[in-house]
Amino acid sequence: MTAPADAQRRGAFSRIAFAVYVALTAYASLYPLEGWREHAASPFEYLFAAWPPRYVSRFDMAVNVLGYVPFGWLCAAALYPRVRGAAGFVVAALAGAALSILLEAGQTYLPTRDASNLDVACNAAGAALGALVAWLFLPWTLEHGPLRRLRNAVFLRGTEVDLGLVLIALWLFVQLNPATLLFGAGSLRDLFAVPEGRARPVEFFVLVETLTAAANVVAVGLLLSCLAAREAPVRALFLALVAGALAIKAGAFALLMRADSVLGWLTPGAQLGLVCGLALGLAALSLPRTAQLAAAAVLLMAGTVVVNLAPPNPYLAATFKVWQQGHFLNFNGLTRVVSAAWPYAALGYLIYLAARRPREPVR
């Protein structure tokens, strides 16, 4: 492989991740994307408002800074190696500031959002910080770092595999939503007026949670297996992925709900589904690649159907009402939209993989 081709392959994951992050940032900044209004003033008038604003929250400032740190890093990584060093830092920092200015201007058309020059300053600072870290450590990370070695040793090569890894990262991100069933995704209830339906016994919700958790954990495990190299420890990777997802779920409950709710999501149905999913998933990893792709697609859609047809769980409804309050409203909307779209994007990706010839012999 020539040097330019190798550099282009190395940057594929960064470019995909950067594009996804920009889309998620735009959605979170403009959430709830309704009630658009017109006004005579310039949408950029907020830039010249009094400094500092009357109402300043340290929490909001921290969130605005931290939210753009990954932007700065990913932007610099997407530009690498064509643009690197000081030039990469400047471009990434300016891109973060420009995106923030545009998104804040868009917020002036939303009645529930307030554009702020302080938010722009915090966003620009976060992007600059991320770009600075990239300037110092990006070449080592992409060329010789442990993540680079892990990527090459464990997973197949190719842009399509990088896209799959981004999908798995988004699946982990979905677990930050404490108002969904364990590993449940694809709910379109918010788009339709779904009737409540008759009351159901507790056993029914246990069954729904079991089927949802088991189907999705097996499907994600098979997707991971289809991305892994032949000699990779697939079962260990599968267990590590599930453990990471559970840790994220528990952390989300602890941060967004209450400290005593760290394991509030681990209901009897979730426990049974987790055990069944792990057992079935470990066994299914021995299937040929074609069978893995087919089984993953079927299980993914089965879990999505269950999530959409099952009546609302009263416990989750109460949880969602509590979590929706406060500073996490926009984050709530972001996790919900990613959760709703993820299984359909994953299904399209599985179909794409099935249509391509595998790059390495199947296990």
Image (tube, rainbow, N blue to C red):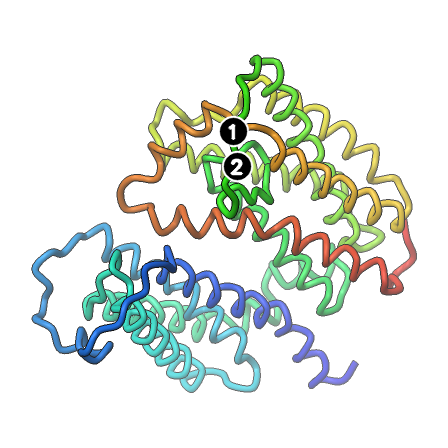
Residue identifier under label 2: 194
Q: Residue at x 60, y 37 (%)?
A: 183
Residue 89, picture quadrant: bottom left
Residue 127, picture quadrant: bottom left
On the image, the x and y values in percent for residue 301 come to 72, 43
Q: Secondary structure at mark 1?
A: loop
On the image, the x and y values in percent for residue 282 come to 78, 33
Residue 207 against residue 254 in the figure, above or below? above
First reached walking from the N terminus: tag 2 or tag 1: 2
Pointer 2 with pointer 1, Cβ within 8 A:
yes
On the image, the x and y values in percent for residue 211 come to 68, 28
Q: Is 58 left, or right, of 357 in this rendering? A: left
> Dot 1: within a 10 Å radius of its alpha carbon, few (fewer than 14), some, or many (20 or more) residues?
some
Q: State the residue in front, 357 or 179.
A: 179
On the image, the x and y values in percent for residue 339 come to 54, 47
- Is residue 5 visible to us here? yes
Quadrant of the snapshot with the N terminus? bottom right
Residue 313 against residue 24 in the figure, above or below? above
Q: Residue at x 80, y 60 (%)?
A: 353
Residue identifier under label 1: 312
Q: Which mark is residue 221?
A: none
